[in-house]
Image: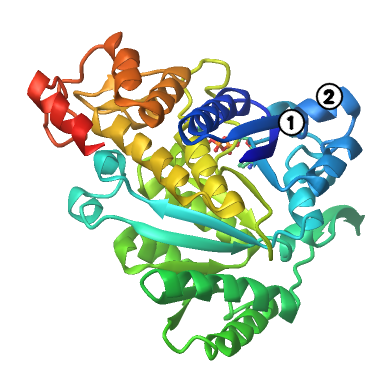
Amino acid sequence: MDLSILVIQGDGIGTEIIPQAQQVLRVVGRRFGHTFSFEEYEAGGAALDHTGAALPEETLAACLTAHTVLFGPVGGPKWDPLPPTERPEQALLTLRGKMDLYADLRPIRMFPQLSHASPLLPQFAAGGIDLVLVRELTGGIYYGSHDIRLHNGQSVASDIMSYTERQVERVARTAFEMARKRRGKVVSVDKSDVLSCSRLWKNVVCRVAQEYPSVQLNHMLADSIAMQLMRNPWQFDVVLTENMLGDVLSGEAAMLTGSIGMIPFASLGNSTEGIFGPIHGTAPDIAGQNIANPLAAILSAAMLLRHSFGLQEEADAVEKAVNRVLDDGYRTVDILSAGCVPVSCSKMGELVAGAVLSPQIYRKIARGLPAPATASGKGRSTQRTGRGRRQKEKEE
Ligand code: NAD
């Protein structure tokens, strides 16, 4: 297949992690006989500097005709003083709106190899975390008007939050469909004790639930789920939230799994079109050092293969390669623990790409690295004997 992907590398660590995802996609092409072509465009801070707009017309037009967009994070301290509507982050918000992508899927999964990196106590981390957060993307307070003005001699700020029934209905269906393919449970999040938007949200979600009798629906207030995610995260299957609450809760849930550098997103609508990327930001504190974790970006490439192109086997191969590299004890610094081998962002990308391609090439790349003392936090040596190595290759 000839597969075309529009790429926006973004700002900060975006220019380091997105090329790793592209590298992995290229080797997926080599192994499975596809040709990936990447069309690169600018958005975010870099675009603001070069063109004066966070989402230049040319980028917007290209995205609207593209099937699939790989989107690196945008923004940074340099552009923080700008008003919200002119900031780099507006590029992604506008793009999601224009492409009518209304549901953000965020699989929050704890890789067992990384349970030590979770801030949860070991007895809680051992329960594992495997939930999908479905966040509404085109409504709520992020899309309302934002205003700061002087009133009676003091500054007064306001942000308008609104939702239509249709906006809630369609994202609720996404969540129920997802739950039907998983463990059959949806928790819908709101602040219906305070907000009118939440009361509408809750009513519409209840109505949609009637179409899905096999799915169990529960409601939780946002403050309650913030606590339950810490206390008992494995109770959740699909979590359905409005836009801003989803943004906040996904940061919390992601961190429970060890690092925000592990979690991808897929912004989807009614078709197979989508925007894919890591949920984290541009990490200005570590940008330019080649130490960022590229696995969220790489895992977003797996989501892209699965959702946009229907390439299940290829997506599985990428996820399996990530598992292999983690199993063998290679870690970027954000997920590093005793006994594991620290690797750079680019080396992590190379390892995953090698593991996708073939065991021989993977071993060749790993040969130059020190051997981990223990792998996966399981205390298993990764310095395999010839026999152990042959067995591993056979499994693949
Ligand atoms: P951030 O996600 O960039 O960083 C938070 C912390 O996590 C930092 O300590 C950072 O070093 C670490 N981190 C994030 N990604 C990592 C990775 N892949 N590997 C290792 N460590 C990683 O959040 P922030 O600092 O609040 O935001 C920085 C900028 O990014 C802001 O301008 C913000 O608006 C923007 N942002 C953009 C997006 C997007 O475009 N999708 C999303 C979130 C934040």
Whether 267 is drawn above or below 70: the answer is below
Which badge, 1 or 2, comes first in the chain's sequence? 1
Q: Name the secondary structure under disc 1.
A: strand
Q: Can you give x and y, in whole percent of width and height, for residue 76 in the image?
A: 68, 30
Which numbered circle lies on residue 39? 1
In this image, 59 relative to 80: left or right?
right
Q: Give the total of numbered labels.
A: 2
Give the label on residue 216, or none.
Answer: none
Instruction: List the single residue furthest toward the top.
Output: 368
**x and y, in percent, of residue 177 in the image:** 52, 73
* Few, some or many residues within 10 Å of mark 1 (<14, 14–19, 20+): few
Residue ID for mark 2:
49
Please tell me which residue lies in front, 44 or 285.
Answer: 44
Looking at the figure, which quarter contains the C terminus? top left
Please determine whether, in this image, residue 253 is positioned above or below residue 183: above
Q: Is residue 81 visible?
A: yes
* Amino acid identity at mark 2: Asp
Question: Residue placed at 76% from the left, 45% from the top?
Answer: 66
- Give the vertical position of 184 relative to 279 (above or below): below
- Amino acid type at circle 1 is Glu
Q: Residue at x 62, y 67 (%)?
A: 242
Q: Position of residue 108 (x, y in %)?
A: 42, 53
